[in-house]
Image: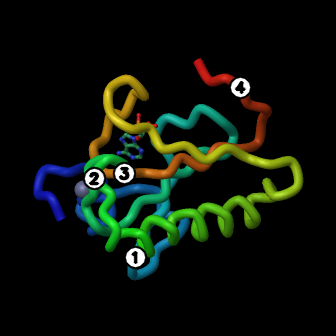
Amino acid sequence: MSADCLFCKIANGDIPAKLVHEDDMAVAFEDIKPVAPVHILVIPRKHIPTVDDIEPEDSQAVGHLFQVAKKIACERGLAENGYRLVFNCKADAGQLVYHIHLHLLGGRKFNWPPG
Ligand code: AMP
Ligand code: ZN
């Protein structure tokens, strides 16, 4: 837990969010500024600032984010047409919140390569 971290506060319930999943390792909630019909952020409860800070002992918690994302994608009917999962790491990728979060994006077609 980092005292000045927005996503730690959401995970702890100190700041409200539209939660879609919660367990002992991860929390998922609706992105406040969605860029697709489905835009959900999946975060570990542990405060890890960037992908670059993931340690070997975080492997289970980070792997679990994909299990949660996949489950939500299935529930939202995205499994057949597909969806996009994104981690932005640091400035060049446009990371704004320094607590890792897996973007689950779906419900429309996405370009490749990204902008
Ligand atoms: P990134 O640019 O990868 O760091 O993404 C940060 C994401 O967090 C953006 O898509 C924001 O819209 C989203 N976001 C910022 N504040 C909140 C909040 N209070 N609740 C939900 N999503 C948020
Ligand atoms: Zn945090």
Q: Position of residue 84 (x, y in %)?
A: 67, 44
What's the residue type where badge 2 is placed?
Asp
First along the sequence among labels 3 and 2:
2
Above or below, 21 relative to 8: below
Cβ(mark 3) to ligand 2 < 8 Å?
no
Residue type beneath disc 1: Met
Circle nearer the N terminus (1, 4): 1
* Residue 25 - label: 1
SS assignment at label 4: loop
Identify the residue shown where x is 15% and y is 58%. 2
Q: CA distance from mark 3 to mark 4?
A: 23 Å
Nearer to the camera, 3 or 95: 95
Which residue position holds label 2? 53
Say what secondary structure mark 2 lies in.
helix
Asked if marks 1 and 4 touch (Cβ < 8 Å), the reply is: no
Q: Residue at x 30, y 63 (%)?
A: 55
Quarter residue 97 falls in: top left
In the depicted view, which residue is nearer to us: 32 or 112?
112
Q: Which residue is mark 4?
A: 112
Where does the image place residue 78, in percent across and percent down from the top left?
Answer: 79, 54
Q: Which badge, 4 or 2, is on the more N-terminal residue?
A: 2
| Pointer 4 local density, CA inside 10 Å: few below 14, some 14–19, many at least 20 | few
Whole-number angstrom distance, CA of label 1 to CA of label 3: 13 Å
Camera-nearest label, 1 or 4: 4
CA distance separating discs 3 and 2: 9 Å
The nearer-to-camera label among 3 and 2 is: 2
Counting residues from the start of the chain, the first of labels 3 and 4 encountered is 3
- Check disc 3 and give the amino acid type: Ile
Q: In this figure, which residue is indicated by the disc labeled 3?
A: 100
Marks 3 and 2 close (CB-CB < 8 Å): yes
